[in-house]
Image (spheres, helix red, strand yellow):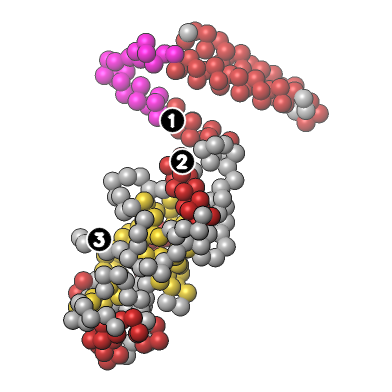
Amino acid sequence: MEKKTAEFQAAATLKDNQIEVTASTEGTLLRDGYVFAPGAWTKNAQRSFSKDGAILVGHDWDDLPIGFPVSSRMEGSDLVSVAQFHTDEVAQRARTIAKERMEAGLSVSVSVGFMPAYEKDSYFGNGADLLSAAEGEGMDMSRFDTKAIRAYKYGVQLCREVAEWFEWSIVLVGRNQLAKARQVHDFSGESAHGLTLREHLEFSLGGIERAFAIERERQAKGRHISQEHRPTIAQIHLVTSQMLESFAQDDESALDTQTDSALEELRQRALMHRAAASLMR
């Protein structure tokens, strides 16, 4: 599979922790002589991307995504994609860098990874020949940058249809020199890592549950927790008990809205966690 790229520019008003990119693709001559025909970005390609696509950095398919698509649409000749950054540190670092570059007046390019319908691609000796063929097929010539394409004296490729759209990436230099990022929205997370309290708790719980599952698998093979892991487990118990105590104190300060039995249950949980922590030390 050949991985093609085409660059976008960001635009419009965004929601929290999102970026919107506009593809200057259909009818535009890219630096290497590649041109997307009007209608090349089909609804099927957009739907599959919105369902399964990813946002990357530098087309690194071996690394984890930094974001996921929220929506995509055509606005005239522009392919518009709204994406949301993940809340992990790497993704938020990418968002921060993009925003800082734009605030400094620098450009931020993005580039798509896709697969064309190769059987529908055509190659021409120059831009004038491409335009002549497009006009002969009844394509909407107003959607082409005819001046730039006609002046191009080298080999060009016309993509009539995108078969699959896999991802778009933040890149340093794009093939489309007009592609410019316009806006990346801040993330109003409650921590330095861009995570809310709820997200921190959910991620922590997921990690602990996974660790417990691994330990069960180890026990089934006759292996047990080593001494080096016990301090970490004890610390988890300690922090958890402190949080439960804090929650109990919060509830205790609002006795008019809590029953005595509910408060007693919270106190009992805190005591149990403190006891478990002391046994692990």
Q: Circle 1: is it few (<14), some (14-19), or many (20+) Cα within 10 Å?
A: few
Q: Quadrant of residue 268?
A: top right
Name the residue type under label 1.
Gly
Question: What number is the disc on residue 207?
Answer: 1
Q: Which residue is mark 2?
A: 88
The magenta span reads 209-231
> Could you tell me if the residues under marks 2 and 3 are in contact, i.e. CB atoms within 8 Å?
no
Q: Quadrant of residue 138?
A: bottom left
Direction from residue 191 to residue 42 in the image, left or right = left
Residue at horizontal 44%, vertical 13%?
231
Q: Is residue 84 visible?
A: no
Q: Which residue is mark 3?
A: 3
Name the residue type under label 2.
Asp
**Residue 183 image position (x, y, % from top left):** 53, 59
**Residue 161 image position (x, y, % from top left):** 29, 74
Task: Examine the rendered structure and indicate whether residue 34 appears above or below residue 271.
Answer: below
Name the residue type under label 3.
Lys
Q: Circle 3: is it few (<14), some (14-19), or many (20+) Cα within 10 Å?
A: few
Tag 3, which secondary structure?
loop
> Could you tell me if the residues under marks 1 and 2 are in contact, i.e. CB atoms within 8 Å?
no
Q: Circle 2: is it few (<14), some (14-19), or many (20+) Cα within 10 Å?
A: some
Task: Examine the rendered structure and indicate whether residue 216 appears above or below residue 97.
Answer: above
> Could you tell me if the residues under marks 1 and 3 are in contact, i.e. CB atoms within 8 Å?
no
Question: What number is the disc on residue 143?
Answer: none
In primary-sequence order, the first of circles 1 and 3 is: 3
Q: CA distance from mark 1 to mark 3?
A: 35 Å
Q: Is residue 227 visible?
A: yes
Q: Nearer the viewer, mark 1 or mark 3?
A: 3
